[in-house]
Each structure stands twice: as C-alpha cells, then as structure tokens.
Amino acid sequence: MSTIPTEGTTLTSPFPYRADQHTAALQALTVFLVQSEMILASWDSYSDRHTDTDGWPYDDESYGWRKVQRDTQTWRSFEPVRRSARYLLATARFQLQHIAAGDVDSRWPWQLTELAKALERLEALRTEWAKAREDRRTSRPAHAQFIDALAERNAEAWSELDTWAIHGHAILDLHFAALKAPAPAPIAVADPTRLPTTSRSAVRR
C-alpha cells in the first residue's frame, strides 16, 4: 500500500487538523478503497457461482446471508473514513479552487458532489440506528430481531458506501494534483461542515 506524501503541502487555516492527521485521513481512505474492491470482487465471484444464467440465486437463504456479509464488511471498512470524511471533502473542494484549470479533471466537481450526498445519507442512517438502539434498550428485542435490523441498516447503506468505493479516489487525485501545483495548494479548510446537497449517486449491483 502506498504512503500518502505530504511534502510541499501547507496548512493555511485555523481548522484543527495537523498535517499528520490529514495524512492519516487520506491513508484511511486508501485502505477503504482497497478493501472495498476486495469485498466487491469476492461478492462478484460468489454471485457468479451461485446464480443461474438469469441471475437468480440457487439458494435464496444462503445468497441473502452472503449479501449481508458483504454489506457488513463494507460498513465496517468505511468507519475509519467516516470520522474524517467531511474534512476530506471540504479540503478537496478547497484544493479544487486553488489548482490551475488545466490540471483539473472535469469529473472531480461531480464526484465530490456525489460523495457529499452519499455521506449525508450514511450519517442519517447512522443517526437513525443510534436512536433505534436506544429504543431497544427498553424493549429488549430478541437477538434475531436485532441482527435483522442491523443487516437492514447495512443493506440500506450499501449504495452510498459503493459510491465512496467508486468515486473516493477523486479525493486522492485532488491531493496529488495539489502536490504537483507550482505553488502547493492548501490542504485544509476552515469549515468542513458546509457541504452541498446533491443528486442521487449511481449504484452498482
């Protein structure tokens, strides 16, 4: 796994992320991109071997539980990224404003927008789950009910997590473009919480 370089970058705002924290956040994203690709490849391999030519599973129950495993693994893999995702997005948008137009990939603004919308939905699901867990403390549901509810949350999050797996590399691409700039582009912003609402992202099956 490659190391995220920081040489030449500068922190130019009062936002409380040090250069080493920024590097750690980028490294967490890199790990997620690698892991999510492995999880998806494993799922695709399983699906190909356990479905007929029309895509119908031979065993619905086994297929369903394997999908639950995929969703759970992807949710857990993203958790280290989630902690700094708003900062990473806001920083990437800030960098985008300081990179020469000729060095900007036309897809980057759209990709950052898709990532922001996906993160917004993931945070909403996380908040809903926290409330549901608190409610269950008094109702004490059966273990099977709890597991089913958790699996449902992870399934609902799948498309948004997949959006990060597809487009998350744009944040890394922007970071490296900022490093190559004649005058290094800033790598931090003052307010990472101000992210726009966007249209729904594309979904892989």
Image (cartoon, grey):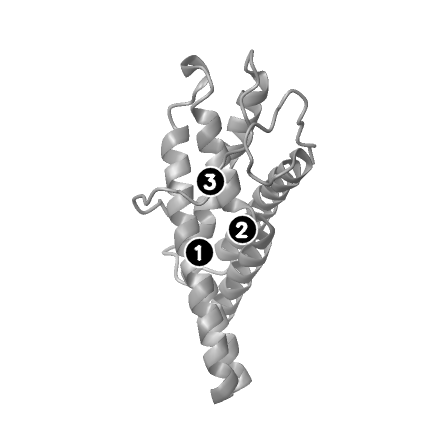
Residue closest to the far left: 199
Query: What residue lies at 57% left-to-right and 24% top-to-bottom?
Result: 176
Q: Residue at x 52, y 28 (%)?
A: 173
Q: Which residue is mark 1?
A: 122
Looking at the image, tell me whether mark 3 or mark 2 is earlier in sequence order. 2
Residue 199 sits above or below residue 103 on the image: below
Q: Closer to the camera, 124 or 13?
A: 13
| x and y, in percent, of residue 38 in the image | 59, 47
Residues at discs 3 and 2 in contact (Cβ within 8 Å): no
Measured Cα–Cα span from mark 3 to mark 2: 17 Å
How busy is the neighbourhood of tag 3: few (under 14 within 10 Å), some, or many (20 plus)?
some
SS for callout 1: helix
Q: Earlier in the sequence, mark 3 or mark 1?
A: 1
Say which residue appears at 46% left-offset and 29% top-offset: 94
Residue wearing tag 2 = 82
Secondary-structure class at tag 2: helix
Mark on residue 191?
3
